[in-house]
Image (spheres, rainbow, N blue to C red):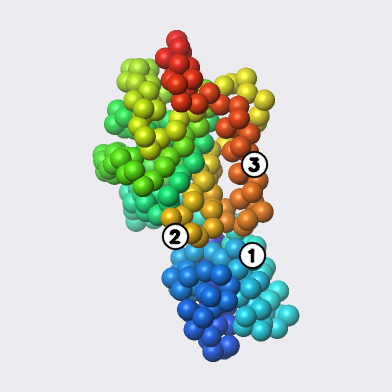
Amino acid sequence: MPDAPALRQDLATELRTLRAMAGVSGRALGELIGTSQGTIWRIEHAQALPTRRQAEAWLDACTADDERTERVLRLLEDAYREAPTWTRTLAGRSHMQSEIAAREHASSLVRNFQPTIVPGLLQTAEYARLLVPYVDRTGEVDVDEHVAKRLDRQAMLDDEGRRFVFLLGERALRWSPDPSVLVAQRERLVAAAQRPTITLGVVPDTAPVVPWHNFVVHEPADGQPTYVTTETVHGELAVREPADVAIYLQLWDQLRRSAAVGDDAVDRIRGLP
């Protein structure tokens, strides 16, 4: 199977060609499929993937024949299935903090579930610095630059026009890259729970729900569809298909119902040995 960038380029070319052949402007197509001209541009330049609903509406609006419709939908399915690897994503770069910050800045609500480590937006500098070698699968991340950019991201927690909900697995409160940083890191979490832009929850080890893996739910401020990002061992995956996003939202609701939130979360953190 071609790698993800090639798949996206092929899909973008197909969709751009379809629109040009149909003589439809980007603005007009956006109105027809329920999105913005900017999103059409990003899709046609392989910077974003359309949802299946958007792709089907695009095909209808451009009166695509059966053969091209089958090809476009197959490319779309393959592009969603194949996650870019860290090796490709980080090629020529020392970190991804700017890209992550851009996603967070573009979201009015960020819901972040982390079962094993403290989320980057809530990490102390010492915790982050010691953590990087554990999670860097390429061996090429510039630790100092990575930590500096991660701390820069934390400034957005003061933006009253944005909301963050963090659910942490209890294991994330017990494990640290070094025991010497654990006390300060827990105190940082307690302080974060008092901020008006943050809701903090702790999911107990005994909660009747399988935590699976980390994921972040983004609700774009511009009204675009909710999407999910999740990190695997080999790369990051963006989930945009509505049916798949719904699975994550259902799991989020289960985790939230099982969590100690607010003052109860603070009590759990302070009660840990």
Tell me the crowding category of disc 1: few under 14, some 14 to 19, or many 20 or more residues within 10 angstroms, Cα based.
some
Q: Badge 2 is on which residue? A: 222
Which numbered mark, 2 or 3, is in the foreground of this view?
A: 2
Q: Is residue 192 above or below residue 111?
A: above
Image-based side of 150 in relation to 247, left or right:
left
Percent x, y for residue 172? Answer: 48, 26
Determine whether label 2 and label 1 are within 8 Å by CB.
no
Q: Which of 97 and 140 is in front in this view?
A: 97
Q: Mark 1 points at which residue?
A: 52
Q: Which quadrant, please, contains the N terminus?
A: bottom right
Residue visible at 52% across and 69% down in the picture? 35
Q: Where is residue 109 in the image (x, y as percent from the top left)?
A: 45, 46
Residue that carries the numbered disc 3 in the rendered image:
250
Question: CA–CA distance between discs 1 and 3?
Answer: 20 Å
Q: Nearer the viewer, residue 273 or 234?
A: 273
Which circle's residue, 1 or 3, is located before the other in the chain?
1
Residue at screen point 45% across, 16% down: 267
